[in-house]
């Protein structure tokens, strides 16, 4: 195996596009060096604020605020506030406020306020206030105030005030003060002072946990509590259930893209500019909850996390007249979602509703 040590951008750019033997390229520089290509199954190691793009089964190790994009069965290890996107059976370990998106059977471990999106039978471990979205038979372990959304036979274990939404045939174990919403044929075990909202499937409650049975089958230990909540049957009841005083004008929330868009690159793409007033052109809310015919909003910004989770997303507050709202009362699939015909975007906020 041949090793080449690179100390400047000029030296890196001068390398040929291919080598006669397997070559290990090691970058050591106090300056920022951009690795803009990979050399056919090569291995790249980058330090000191480097930026790396690697394809074709490459293996990348990046430290010190590095940014890495790796594709083609790549393996990535990134530290120091790194941002990583890895696809095609990639394996990623990212720490220190890292943001990771991994697809196609990827395995991801992210720590220290990391944000992770993992798809395709991915396995995710997230620590330190991490936010995780996992699809397709994914397995997720999230600790320390993490927020997790898991679909399709996912297995989730959550600690330390985590918030979990699980669908399909997911299995969830929650400790401490975690909050869990479970759909489909999910199986949930809740301990300590966790809260479970069960819409279907089965749940077991232990310790001093509390379960809200909204269609699910719950069993409990002696100290646990099961509550069967009353479902709202009118718009005013829906508002009161969500802590909103009925009035002529209501403020609700949406999650939008970094460019203030929803339904991007579709015929229903909508721009939610601050200060703009929007009216739905084809108002027809009486059918299904999802889909066309209405705009959607939530009573709290973080409820909108259930419906989209893309890097750079923002939250907005929308002022809506009560007469322009529509609530689905016949056993709704998404009880935190409401339809509206017309609204004015009044400000941007954080996920708790605080105005920015």
Image: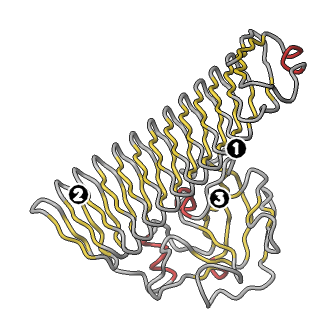
Sequence order check: which comes first, mark 3 or mark 1?
1
Count how many numbered circles sit on residues in the image: 3
Which element carries disc 1, helix, strand or loop?
Answer: loop
How packed mark 2 is, by other alpha carbons closer than 10 Å (few <14, some 14-19, many 20 or more), is many
Residue drawn at the location 60% of the way across and 65% of the way down: 252
Sequence order check: which comes first, mark 2 or mark 1?
1
Residue drawn at the location 46% of the way across and 41% of the way down: 126
Inter-mark Cα distance, 3 to 1: 29 Å
Closer to the camera in the image, 276 or 226: 226
Percent coordinates x, y for residue 352 in the rendering: 53, 50
Instruction: Say which quadrant the N terminus sits in.
Output: top right
Q: Is residue 308 above or below residue 21?
A: below
Sequence order check: which comes first, mark 2 or mark 3?
2
Instruction: Say which quadrant the C terminus sits in.
Output: top right
Q: Is residue 43 left or right of residue 36?
A: left
Q: Is residue 87 left or right of residue 173?
A: right
According to the image, label 1 marks what residue? 71
Which element carries disc 2, helix, strand or loop?
Answer: loop
According to the image, label 2 marks what residue? 209
Inter-mark Cα distance, 2 to 3: 30 Å
Q: Is residue 69 above or below residue 177?
A: above
Percent coordinates x, y for residue 60 in the rendering: 65, 30
Mark number displayed over residue 255: 3
Percent coordinates x, y for residue 355 in the rendering: 63, 47
Residue drawn at the location 74% of the way across and 30% of the way down: 52
Residue drawn at the location 59% of the way across and 65% of the way down: 307
- Front tag of 3 and 1: 1
Closer to the camera in the image, 150 or 175: 150
Percent coordinates x, y for residue 257 in the rendering: 72, 55
Asked whether disc 2 touches disc 1, contact meaning CB atoms under 8 Å apart, the reply is no
- Front tag of 2 and 1: 1
Q: Is residue 347 above or below residue 323?
A: above
């Amino acid at each position: 195996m041949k090793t080449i040590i690179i100390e400047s951008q000029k030296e890196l750019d001068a390398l040929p596009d291919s080598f006669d033997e397997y070559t290990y390229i090691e970058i050591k520089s106090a300056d920022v060096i951009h690795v803009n290509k990979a050399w056919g199954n090569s291995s790249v190691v980058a330090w000191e604020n480097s930026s790396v793009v690697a394809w074709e089964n490459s293996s990348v190790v990046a430290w010190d605020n590095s940014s890495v994009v790796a594709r083609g069965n790549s393996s990535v290890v990134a530290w120091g506030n790194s941002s990583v996107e890895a696809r095609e059976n990639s394996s990623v370990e990212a720490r220190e406020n890292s943001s990771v998106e991994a697809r196609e059977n990827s395995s991801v471990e992210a720590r220290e306020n990391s944000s992770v999106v993992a798809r395709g039978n991915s396995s995710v471990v997230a620590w330190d206030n991490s936010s995780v979205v996992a699809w397709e038979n994914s397995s997720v372990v999230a600790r320390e105030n993490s927020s997790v959304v898991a679909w399709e036979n996912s297995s989730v274990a959550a600690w330390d005030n985590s918030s979990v939404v699980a669908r399909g045939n997911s299995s969830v174990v929650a400790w401490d003060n975690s909050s869990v919403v479970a759909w489909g044929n999910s199986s949930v075990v809740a301990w300590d002072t966790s809260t479970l909202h069960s819409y279907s499937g089965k749940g077991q409650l232990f310790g001093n946990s509390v379960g809200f049975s909204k269609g699910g089958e719950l069993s409990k230990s002696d100290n646990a509590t099961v509550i069967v909540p009353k479902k709202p049957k009118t718009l005013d009841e829906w508002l009161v259930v969500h802590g909103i005083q009925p009035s002529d004008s209501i403020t609700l929330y949406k999650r939008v893209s970094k460019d203030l868009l929803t339904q991007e690159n579709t015929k229903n793409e909508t721009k939610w500019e601050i200060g703009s007033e929007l009216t739905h052109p084809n108002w027809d809310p009486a059918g299904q909850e999802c889909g066309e015919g209405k705009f959607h909003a939530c009573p709290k910004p973080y409820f909108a996390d259930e419906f989209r989770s893309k890097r750079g997303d923002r939250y907005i507050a929308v002022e809506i007249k009560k007469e322009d709202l529509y609530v689905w009362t016949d056993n709704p699939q998404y009880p935190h979602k409401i339809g509206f015909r017309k609204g004015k975007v009044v400000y941007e906020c954080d996920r708790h509703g605080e105005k920015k």
